[in-house]
């Protein structure tokens, strides 16, 4: 059993975005969940950004019903093979089986692994499914601020709840998301030396912030170089508390309440 680093305060937390279905966890997925629990995790939201990953996430949530929740969606990198009839069917089935959100979906114009028009179609369809089912949507956006902003505003008018995950954009998109009734989530990137978004962190209303690892990616300082895991969330919470000028206990409690509200967790 692995305990959190001794220098990090122990706070209760919800990791709002972790890719525990990733092959990086194939050898020790159960141990990772247990290590997170010991570190203070009340829940981990396991992202199902493909049909395969959604299945793994659902199975993990069934094995740990009080510790793990799942999502289901088509990532923008895979939008070139998106088929509405096929993919919306398994996403809807995953939601019926207990997945708490649609996604990860969205737009990625940085890598452009899929044509942009196909990304927009897949994203719009999943936003529509979120509206139909009343579930929130987990959104990935990179170098696609104008299109994302327009679609978030439209979604907000339609009553769709969403979160911009691992946010690295400017203040304009974050402000539009908050105005649309959305949340903004921050990852270990806020601990990196080249992070310049403290003003954005401070500008988000306290009740609209989420925290995530995006594990196994984006391992926070001071544990850079290791595979990221949910147990490292306290490092991110600590940094958010410093930026916002408050205590880690206050920020941690607010972030937990926010995740419960967003995902409708008990």
Image (cartoon, rainbow, N blue to C red):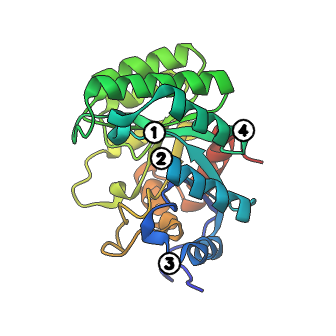
User: For residue 50, which numbered disc appears in the image?
Assistant: 2
Count the marks. Answer: 4
Of the numbered discs 1 and 4, the one sitting upstream in the chain is: 1
Q: Which residue is mark 1?
A: 74
Q: Does the residue at mark 2 contact the one at mark 3 (Cβ under 8 Å)?
A: no
Classify mark 3: helix, strand or loop.
Answer: loop
For marks 4 and 3, give the CA distance: 29 Å
Q: Nearer the viewer, residue 245 or 175?
A: 175
Q: Residue at x 50, y 78 (%)?
A: 27
Position of 248 relative to 81 (above/below): below
Position of 76 relative to 134 (above/below): below
Expressed as whole percent of the image width and height from the top left, the position of residue 11 reads 61, 66
User: For residue 96, which numbered disc appears in the image?
Assistant: 4
Of the numbered discs 4 and 3, the one sitting upstream in the chain is: 3
Expressed as whole percent of the image width and height from the top left, the position of residue 54 reads 56, 50
Q: Nearer the viewer, residue 264 or 194?
A: 264
Of the numbered discs 2 and 3, the one sitting upstream in the chain is: 3
Whether residue 47 is visible, yes or no, is no
Q: Residue furthest bottom?
A: 1
Position of 3 relative to 182 (above/below): below
Query: Callout 3: few (<14), some (14-19), or many (20+) C-alpha neighbours within 10 Å?
Result: few
For marks 2 and 3, give the CA distance: 20 Å
Of the numbered discs 2 and 4, the one sitting upstream in the chain is: 2
Position of 32 relative to 216 (above/below): below
For marks 2 and 4, give the CA distance: 16 Å
Q: Residue at x 41, y 54 (%)?
A: 187
Question: In the visual, does 129 lie left or right of 219?
Answer: right
Q: Which residue is mark 3?
A: 27
Of the numbered discs 3 and 1, the one sitting upstream in the chain is: 3
């Amino acid at each position: 059993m692995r305990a959190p680093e001794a220098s990090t305060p122990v706070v209760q937390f919800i990791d709002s975005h972790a890719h525990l279905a990733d092959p990086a966890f194939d050898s020790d997925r159960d141990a990772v969940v247990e290590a997170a629990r010991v570190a203070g995790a009340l829940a981990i939201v396991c992202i199902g950004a493909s049909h395969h990953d959604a299945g793994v996430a659902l199975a993990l949530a069934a094995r740990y019903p009080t510790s793990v929740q799942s999502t289901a969606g088509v990532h923008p990198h895979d939008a070139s093979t998106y088929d509405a009839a096929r993919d919306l069917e398994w996403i809807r089935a995953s939601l019926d089986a207990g997945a708490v959100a649609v996604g990860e979906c969205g737009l990625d114009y940085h890598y452009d692994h899929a044509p942009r028009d196909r990304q927009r179609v897949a994203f719009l369809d999943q936003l529509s499914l979120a509206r139909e089912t009343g579930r929130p949507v987990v959104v990935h956006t990179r170098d696609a601020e104008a299109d994302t902003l327009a679609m978030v505003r439209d979604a907000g008018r339609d009553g769709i709840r969403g979160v911009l995950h691992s946010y690295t954009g400017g203040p304009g998109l974050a402000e539009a998301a908050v105005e649309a009734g959305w949340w903004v989530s921050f990852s270990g990137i806020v601990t990196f030396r080249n992070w310049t978004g403290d003003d954005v962190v401070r500008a988000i209303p306290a009740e609209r912030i989420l925290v995530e690892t995006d594990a196994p990616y984006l391992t926070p300082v001071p544990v850079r170089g290791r595979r990221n895991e949910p147990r490292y969330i306290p490092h991110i919470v600590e940094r958010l508390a410093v930026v916002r000028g408050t205590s880690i206990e206050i920020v941690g409690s607010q972030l937990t309440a926010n995740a419960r509200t967003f995902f409708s967790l008990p």
